[in-house]
Image (cartoon, grey):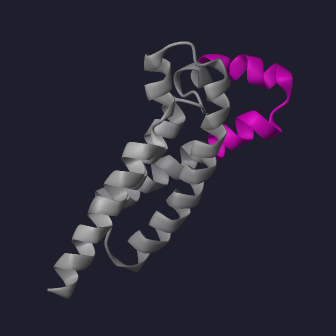
Amino acid sequence: MKAVKIIDAICIVIFVLMGVYIFVLPNATQDLLLPVFTIINPYMTGAWIMGIGFLVTCLWGKGRAGLVLGIVLLVCYLITAFVSLVGLMVVTTGLDLLWYLHPIPIVIGCIVAICRKTRGQSS
């Protein structure tokens, strides 16, 4: 599906932009872009966007291009999820903890989707 490829591309672009913001830009430029990355926080919102994009890829991705984009998105998501673990240092409430535990439902959803796909193809 074309929509899955577009979602994957958007997620990969977000990942690249987050990496550039964190590791490449000088401090003065980071300060200018801070309002944008307050909304797309690499530790919270960015990780959720990546996870949902990965889940969409697992559910509806097809063909070789879907597989390649899915693998690229998996790597991007795992890096983002690992970076989001840094956010656990500032957890103060149970709701905060739920916000940072996004890899658990995303990974379970992807495993279920992939298992259903493989059962459907083998029948």
Magenta residues span 16-35
**Residue visible at 21% across and 82% down in the picture:** 121
State the residue in front, 17 or 120: 120
Extreme front residue here? Answer: 94
x, y percentage for residue 44? Answer: 53, 29
Residue at image location 60% in from the left, 33% down from the top: 42
Relative to 37, is 24 on the left or the right?
right
Residue 123 appears in the rendering: yes
Q: Nearer the viewer, residue 73 or 8?
A: 73
Q: Residue furthest bottom?
A: 122
The residue at the point 58 percent across, 22 percent down is: 36
**Residue 77 in the image: above or below residue 62:** above
Q: Which quadrant would the N terminus be assigned to in this image?
A: bottom left
Residue 70's quadrant in the figure?
Answer: bottom left
Q: Residue at x 84, y 23 (%)?
A: 27
- Quarter location, residue 88: top right
Q: How far across and how far down the image is residue 61, in percent? A: 32, 66
Q: Residue lying furthest top in this view?
A: 92
Quarter of the figure with the C terminus: bottom left
Q: Is residue 21 magenta?
A: yes
Locate residue 62, reporting x and y percent: 31, 72
Q: Position of residue 100 (x, y in %)?
A: 51, 31
For the stretch drawn in magenta, what is the main secondary structure? helix
Left or right position of 67 against 35:
left
Which of the pair 47/25 is nearer the observer? 47
Examine the rendered structure and indicate whether residue 31 appears above or below residue 121.
above
Count of numbered marks = 0
